[in-house]
Image (cartoon, grey):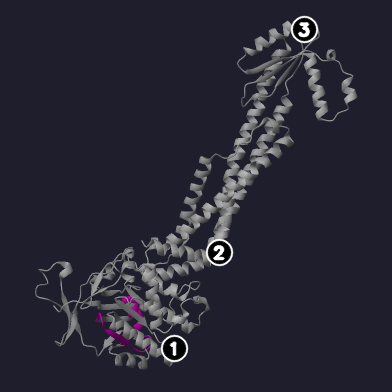
Amino acid sequence: MNAAWIARNVRRQVEAHPKMVVSTSVAFCLLALVAGGARLGARTVERWGAFVGQNVHLIVYFSGNVDEEQALGLRDILRRTPAVAQVAVIEPAQALARLTAAAATLRADAPVVDTLEPAYFPRSLEVSLAPAADLAQRAQDLAKRLRNVPGVSEVDAMTTGLARLSVWVKVGRTLGLVVLVALGLVALLVLVAVFLRGREAMARRAAVLVQLGDTEAAIRLPSALWTASAALVGGGMGACVLALAWRPLLGRLERSLGIASMLPSSPLAPAEIAAGLLLLVTAGLAMGYFATPLAATHDHA
Amino acid sequence: MPERSVRKVSGTAALPYDRVVLWLEGIGCQRHGKAVLDGVTFGVPSGELVVIEGSPASGKSTLLEVAATIRLPERGAVWFAGRNTTTLQQASLPFVRRNLGYYVADALLVEEDTAVDNVMAALAVRGEALKAAKAGALDSLALVRAADLADRAVASLSSGQKRMVALARTLAGPPPLVVADEPAALLGDEARAVVVAALAAARDLGSAVLVATADSALANALVAAGGRRIHLVDGRMVGAPAVELVPEPDYHEASREERPARLVSLDGDDQGSALEAPLSKGPR
């Protein structure tokens, strides 16, 4: 195999068909964005799920005659329950402080909040359940049992919110999947169109080389090499775009959902990027190799 | 055996001059059920120019396609440098084709490449280093008086200029066997003289040159340049002496590489050369 000749053919093909090379790079960039986006998206959804799992699922309000000792007693009982992850007693003063802070964030009318006193707020327990697929159902079951406990005046199971969040996560996942599949199809269509468009010129070059006695591998290799290079460049561009744009985009989204400050962003690891690029380069190599049309010029066996 | 002179073909193998490069034996071809070639037998030793002359549709182009391994004959055998190409696998054909130059008037060229790139492709495929291939390509372009076209894209050339580039590619090296079908078609007198001179030059450098034409003037010019004429009428050779290959007495004792066989005419007029010679496989 004459490596210099192969390299020259690669350069000639790139010079002769720059649009084809650029389109191929763009298509591979799109594929990298789709694959990387899917990976990061799945990871984000997983984290959001964990975030939801760490939040308060039940609030147990005590009646006015329950003192701190009784509240702590119920807290200890709940802590021993397997489905419960965390329990905290919220004193009336603490509840008022939270409301005041929330009102300040929402720019609510401060004088109205100022008129409130800690005594208006009942002592309560905030219960976080262990993460599970049937979180809403578990919260409902536990709330039902807690309502029968003496001294408990009300239990907020927050089931509506949990159920709604679960539905939104499912819808988001489905929509994300549809968008990713559509983008992946667009990238593949671009690749197919690029190779169909350049097929005639590639076939002509291949026919010339067949007649001159070049081997099948030597004829196909230049196309395979430039396609693999385009895949590497496109994939690298996609990885760079994800690295630069993912954090700001995710940050903006999480801020809009009110969870920005609580979640660290998670870009792709170098090993993941390397594996992705390797996959794209292999795909490019195979695509370029087999896309070269090679007609037999002899009816030998 | 006469003393062998040896010429480097691809930098890795050698082809002795004194052997038959191409031997066609009882070639028969059909097209749409009608015989196009029937029992054609002849050989072309290295350093000889053979002109197949015949009217249009006499089977000349088919015969050249068979010789150039483009087409498989229904009957007979094609021996190229000692190998029967009709029994070769598809994967082996590139190693045969890179050792021959094949020219047709509508030869395929890579339009977006320059003329010199197109010509040097033939040498690079044989394993020549790029520098040597480019030098050889420029020599070949100069041989057909097309050196000034070297750096021009083929797409920008006229059809006549493209034919000269294709001829330069056919003669680049030159290869052990040159097969040219109507090499002067649609060319003016000046270009025609260049073609004759270039084919004769390839012959003088040791190539076996096989030319087919319906143009009597071209055939006469090639014969005047030392060519041997064979008439083809309705797929049959007419007036050519029947020939056979006669092995040397020690043929059966010799190893395959050493087996000599001599091409002689049946009337006893020795035509010259031995049949078997190693093919240049090149580094690929």
Left or right for A39, reference B84: right
Residue at 66% across, 10% down:
A76
Nearer the observer: mark 2 or 3; the answer is 2
Residue at 49% across, 51% down:
A281
- Name the secondary structure under disc 3: loop
Amino acid found under the numbered disc labelled 3: Val
- Name the secondary structure under disc 2: helix
* Gap between marks 2 and 1 measured at Cα: 36 Å
Q: Chain of mark 2?
A: A
Q: Give the residue number, with chain letter if any, for mark 2.
A: A18
Q: Give the residue number, with chain letter if any, for mark 3.
A: A66
Q: Nearer the viewer, residue A134 or B39?
A: A134
Residue at 29% across, 78% down:
B28
Q: Can you tell which quarter of the image residue A149 is in? A: top right
Residues at circles 2 and 1 in contact by the CB criterion of under 8 Å: no
Q: Can you tell which quarter of the image residue B60 is in? A: bottom left
